[in-house]
Amino acid sequence: HYSHWNAASSLGDWLKEEGVAGLSGVDTRMLTKKIRESGAMMGRIEVDLDAPAPDFSKILNPNLRHLVDEVSCKEIKVYGKGNPVKILAVDCGMKYNIIRRLCERGAELTVVPWNHPFASEMDKYDGLFVSNGPGDPTMNKETIEELHKFVTCPDSEVKPLFGICLGNQLMGIAAGGKAEKLPFGNRGQNQPVLNHQTGECYITPQNHGYHINCDTLGEDWKVLFTNANDGSNEGIAHQTRPYFTAQFHPEASCGPSDTEFMFDTFLDACQKPPTEKIIFPRRKPAPPVTKAKKILLLGSGGTSIGQAGEFDYSGGQAIKALKEEGK
């Protein structure tokens, strides 16, 4: 008997079939307290409860590996061949959904390895995209050098640039900023980000352990996005040229999709004169609040006894919000 009526096997059986280790009986609250006090740290799964404490100096530290070199493509690939807007994309560990989002909007995407000398080839393309990826951004020296060449080109050779996640960090370093490791990193699907150009706040999905300290950014650059929770940088933009980046993931599936418009903004810039700055669209104003004297709120109970807590909480919050509106 499985917990779901449509299940064909148990979770344990499926993990065994796939060769994936599963853990149970772990006090996750204790782990949370340790990480909260000490920041992200290395760990090891130990099945022998009587084993001596491991010597972590002898354990392979993934943070010392060149992870981008491991996950980047090894040869040039083209996606959306024949599409009108020609984009060169630097693959630092690019997600396929980024490729989908660009190609479905009319981009022919030429994807190159992380250390490809792309700055000298931009006369063949309408714009440059720098992807997400894992690990310490400072290890990608070749990419940073190429980006510095790209953004310091003569005005007559300017092409739009869009970077996501690691792409933001690499561009930030090339623009004079410094990469710093966050104590915990920003993870999850509900990170609030402020847009300094429009004053709007987006709900964004994120998964990164580094950010850019913008105190040393070049005078031609400005902070574009900021995390509303911890104040860390979430993107930069050039003062006069069409270069911009985002630390979060506009392409995330299954969302939130608040910032998916950034792909349209980038591709639109690739079809305009390079002298035009990046301008983000403003969201439509919220519809007027419905005037009502009485409201019937129908709640939902739990699927079984003891599971109604989250529904009670949601209903309570709805009632609180309505009271604040004077209902």
Image (spheres, helix red, strand yellow):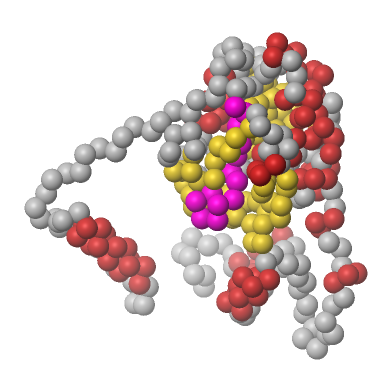
Whether 7 is among the magenta residues is: no
At a point 69% along the width and 34% down the height, the residue shown is 218
In the image: residue 36, left or right of residue 317? right
Q: Is residue 188 visible?
A: no
Residue at 78%, 77% (x, y): give it: 46
Q: Is residue 160 above or below residue 189?
A: above
The image quadrant that residue 95 belongs to is top right
Q: Report the side of 46 relative to 252 (left or right).
A: right
Residue 9 visible: yes
Please, is residue 26 above or below residue 325 in the view? below
The residue under the point 52% across, 73% down is 1
Instruction: Please give the range of residues in magenta.
Output: 227-239
Q: Quadrant of residue 25?
A: bottom right
Indicate the quadrant where residue 223 lies. top right
Q: Position of residue 184 (x, y in %)?
A: 64, 61
- Quarter containing the C terminus: bottom left
* x then y, percent, for residue 79: 69, 25
Please provide percent x and percent y for residue 212.
Answer: 67, 46
Which residue is painted at 76% across and 30% down in the image? 147
The answer to whether 160 appears left or right of 90 in the picture is left
Answer above or below: position of 208 versus 128.
below
Q: Residue 319: horizontal and vertical position, in percent?
A: 23, 62
Q: Which residue is at the far right?
A: 58
Front-lying residue, 2 or 24: 24
